[in-house]
Image (cartoon, helix red, strand yellow):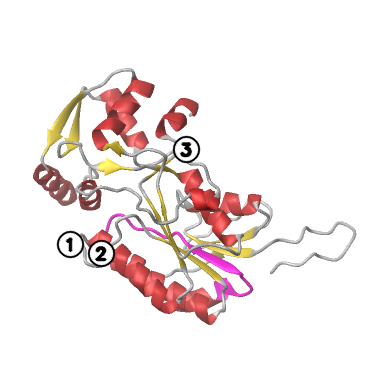
Amino acid sequence: MAATSEGTHSEPVLKKEVCVFGGTGFLGQRIVSHLLALGCGVRVVSRHPHEPTRPHVAAVKADIRDPASLAGALVGADALVNAVSLYAETPDLSFADVHVTGAAALARAASESRIAQFVQLSGIGANPDSDSAYIRARGEGEAAVRWEKPNAVIVRPSVMFGPEDGFLETLQRIIRLSPVLPLFGSGDALLQPVYVENVAEAIARILTCDDHHKLYEFGGPRIYTYREIVETIARVRARRLPLLLPTPFAVWRAAARAGSTLGLRAVSTTEIELMERDNVASDLPGLAELGVTPTSIETFLYEN
């Protein structure tokens, strides 16, 4: 842990030194901010680190796909968050590479480095037996991390929203510009979107408290159908509801294949698979157990 430096102007004693892998991403950068607010020092670990601009933040180079690079990044750290995510596979990188093999390598390195706390980001619905490669990798990743680091805390958020997200902002743009919005199926899939700041705050609290559970599911304050989310955005932001067109999932999958073939980024197979399933938190411990009050989509839209 960091210690107070000698001299007239001493640095404050930091509560913990936390490594955040994926600390430059949508969620990761917010985890960093909440850890700093709670008095922690943070190492933002990535393949391409940038010079930090905030006190008590260090940029460290490492890659979860390169086990040899991990030990040096962990020296002297007290805790670790794995917020590395992959939502679209490439010819050189699979879901299993990141969410299973990479997560296991990081958990193994944490055990070998005697890191006391390890938080693994997963997702609601993670299932090692799923026919979806993404959902299956998330489930297998949880098991792999548990094998290497039995006291790891697994965090499963629902779909996250916030500034510059790929969810609400995409829908807002379509609603604003198009007279027609195709729904995933009939638009009846149940979702419990959770504000990204709430998730980041909860993770920071896990790392700065001694009494916590080993598995959490984070959902927002309300369960919506996909159609209701679209209607909510239109009511608050666009003042106009486009024609909502039920679209079979087979059509979405064909569009994803065509887009992939043509090199166009429209919708991914993973996004389609996730929308075929309800994404709602169970009775597992959640935000409330960590003292975090969830922010609704409506509140976020009105205030931003």
Packing grade of label 2 (10 A; few <14, some 14-19, many >=20) is many
CA gap between label 1 and label 2 equals: 7 Å
Asked whether the beta carbons under mark 1 and mark 2 sit within 8 Å of each other, the answer is yes
* Residue furthest bottom in the image: 112
Q: Is residue 35 left or right of residue 62?
A: right
What residue is rendered at 32% in x and 48% in y?
Answer: 280
Q: Is 171 included in the stretch rendered in magenta?
A: no
Nearer-N-terminus badge (1/3) = 1
- The amino acid type found where label 1 is placed reads Asp
Q: Read off the residue under disc 3.
A: 295
Packing grade of label 3 (10 A; few <14, some 14-19, many >=20) is some
Mark number, residue 131: 1
CA gap between label 1 and label 3 equals: 32 Å
Q: Is residue 113 left or right of residue 99?
A: right
Q: Secondary structure at mark 1?
A: loop
Mark toward the viewer: 1 or 3: 3
Nearer-N-terminus badge (1/2) = 1
Q: Secondary structure at mark 2?
A: helix
Packing grade of label 1 (10 A; few <14, some 14-19, many >=20) is few
Q: Read off the residue under disc 2.
A: 136
Locate residue 295, reporting x and y percent.
Answer: 47, 37
